[in-house]
Image: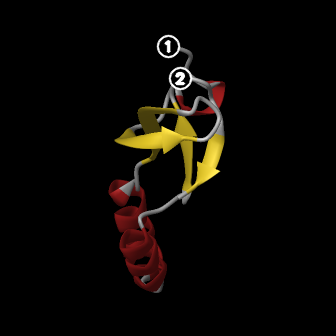
Amino acid sequence: MRFPFEIIDKPLQVRLRLCQGCEDVTLHGKPAVRHWLHFGLTLMTGLWLIVWIIVAVQGGDRLQTCLKCGRREFR
């Protein structure tokens, strides 16, 4: 299994999806929302709470990476 370089050191949310590159059902990962970072920014600024709510509702990064072939797909 090949891991794309940019996602190796980040916490991931992983799902099974059909990959258009592999034409197979594979694991797809995307970076998880780092709530501790948003909490700290909210404590420092107060206004960051608005951004945090938007990011949490949308689920963060919308590009998912196939963990087999490395192709990035919009979910």
Residue 36 spot, x, y in % from top left: 34, 56
Residue toward you, 6 or 66: 66
Q: Quick check: marks 1 and 2 in contact, CB under 8 Å? A: yes
Q: Is 13 drawn above or below residue 7 in the view shown? A: below
User: What residue sits 37% from the left and 75% below the top?
Assistant: 57
What residue appears at the point 44 percent right and 72 percent down from the top-left corner?
Answer: 58
Secondary structure beneath dot 1 equals loop
The alpha-carbon separation of the residues under discs 1 and 2 comes to 5 Å
Q: Give the secondary structure at mark 2.
A: loop
- Which residue shows up at 50% across the image and 13% down it? 1
Q: In this picture, is 35 found above or below 65?
A: below
Residue that carries the numbered disc 2 in the rendered image? 68
Q: Amino acid at mark 1?
A: Met
Q: Position of residue 74 (x, y in %)?
A: 60, 57
Left or right: 73 with respect to 34? right
Q: Residue at x 48, y 79 (%)?
A: 51
Where residue 29 sits, quadrant-wise, is top left
Q: Amino acid at mark 2?
A: Lys
